[in-house]
Image: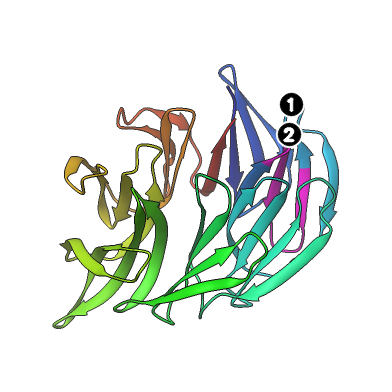
């Protein structure tokens, strides 16, 4: 089991067996597919061999890629600058399509069964459901700015920044595929990130803490973290990128990578 970290200062890092080495140039978002690691940086999205870290190829994408996801042999890159999601071949980088994705979109999540994508549309106040070919299936309207989106049990969840009086609140909503919306939780702080879990639950991060919700929408645990940047789940673990601190395993809180500019992490 190895850990890849997109570090905006040190570069793309491979962490394995207690050691750490640089494999590529600095990146902002990661995705693994077909034995390859794709790392989106400021100018290009570069591909590396998962087993060795050897550089394989690259592709041009819109600037401002903030999140990536994979379905089968395709990789999807969400651009906050271009307000779009781009699909490309996981093996060659050949571009296969592009679709609008709100206004300054923030997050993209693949369905566990590998046929759907969910996009947090940012300032447009939309959560967008797409198929693997980037065809829009449905747009869900939500309060405020949609900062995170994931699949929750048999529906979906959205993390939004919502005005509550004179302050902004982090509000987590459960959304059915038909569009029925229920507020699960709210906290008077800025929202940061959201991640769906294999058991049908989710984990949200906001300024000050992370909160784990089970599939029945009940709180499982809460932990203090000053500024969670990215949450991801893989191989029975939950990874957290914490601003200025590095990458942690949850819920143990054990730090597995120390770096002030760790922006994304991937466990293989």
Is residue 10 visible in the rendered structure shown here? no
Placement of the N terminus among the 4 image quadrants: top right
Depth check: 32 or 254 in front?
A: 32
Residue range highlighted in magenta: 33-47
Q: Image point 28% across, 66% down: which residue?
A: 190
Q: Is residue 17 left or right of residue 58?
A: left
> What secondary structure is the stretch in magenta mostly built from?
strand
Residue at image x 36%, y 76%? 145
| Residue 197 place in picture, x, y as percent | 38, 41
Q: Is residue 75 above or below residue 240?
A: below
Q: Quadrant of residue 34?
A: top right
Q: What kind of element bears circle 1?
A: loop
Q: Residue furthest left?
A: 165
| Alpha-carbon span between mark 2 and mark 1 | 7 Å
Q: Residue at x 39, y 67 (%)?
A: 147
According to the picture, the residue beneath numbered tag 2 turns out to be 35
Q: Is residue 106 visible?
A: yes
Considering depth in this image, is 23 or 202 the residue closer to the camera? Answer: 202
Name the mark nearer the viewer: 2 or 1.
Answer: 2
Q: Are marks 2 and 1 in contact (CB under 8 Å)?
A: yes
Could you say where residue 14 lies in the image, as x and y percent from the top left? 65, 31
Q: Is residue 75 above or below residue 78?
A: above
Label 1, on which residue? 51
Mark 2 or mark 1: whose residue is earlier in sequence: 2
Q: Residues within 10 Å of mark 1 (few under 14, many from 20)?
A: few
Residue 114 appears left or right of 25:
left
**Is residue 181 inside the magenta stretch?**
no
Alpha-carbon neighbours of circle 2 within 10 Å: few (<14), some, or many (≥20)?
A: few
């Amino acid at each position: 089991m190895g850990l890849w970290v997109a570090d905006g200062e040190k570069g793309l890092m491979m962490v394995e067996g207690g050691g750490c080495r640089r494999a590529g140039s600095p990146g902002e978002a990661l995705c693994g597919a077909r034995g390859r690691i794709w790392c989106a940086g400021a100018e290009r999205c570069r591909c590396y061999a998962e087993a060795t870290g050897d550089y394989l190829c690259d592709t041009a994408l819109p600037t401002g890629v903030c999140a990536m996801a994979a379905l089968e042999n395709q990789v999807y890159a969400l651009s906050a600058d271009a307000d779009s999601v781009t699909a490309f071949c996981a093996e060659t980088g050949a571009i296969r399509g592009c679709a609008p994705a709100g206004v300054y979109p923030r997050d993209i999540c693949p369905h566990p069964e590998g046929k759907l994508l969910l996009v947090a549309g940012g300032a447009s106040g939309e959560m967008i459901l797409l198929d693997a070919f980037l065809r829009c299936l449905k747009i869900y309207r939500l309060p405020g700015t949609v900062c995170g989106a994931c699949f929750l049990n048999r529906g979906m969840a959205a993390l939004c920044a919502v005005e509550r009086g004179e302050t902004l609140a982090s509000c987590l909503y459960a959304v059915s595929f038909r569009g029925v919306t229920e507020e699960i939780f709210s906290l008077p702080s800025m929202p940061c990130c959201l991640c769906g879990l294999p058991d049908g639950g989710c984990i949200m991060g906001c300024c000050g803490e992370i909160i784990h919700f089970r599939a029945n929408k009940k709180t499982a645990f809460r932990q203090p973290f000053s500024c969670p940047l990215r949450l991801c789940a893989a191989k029975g673990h939950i990874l957290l990128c914490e601003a200025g601190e590095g990458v942690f395993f949850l819920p143990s809180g054990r730090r597995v990578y120390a770096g002030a500019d760790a922006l994304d992490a991937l466990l293989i």
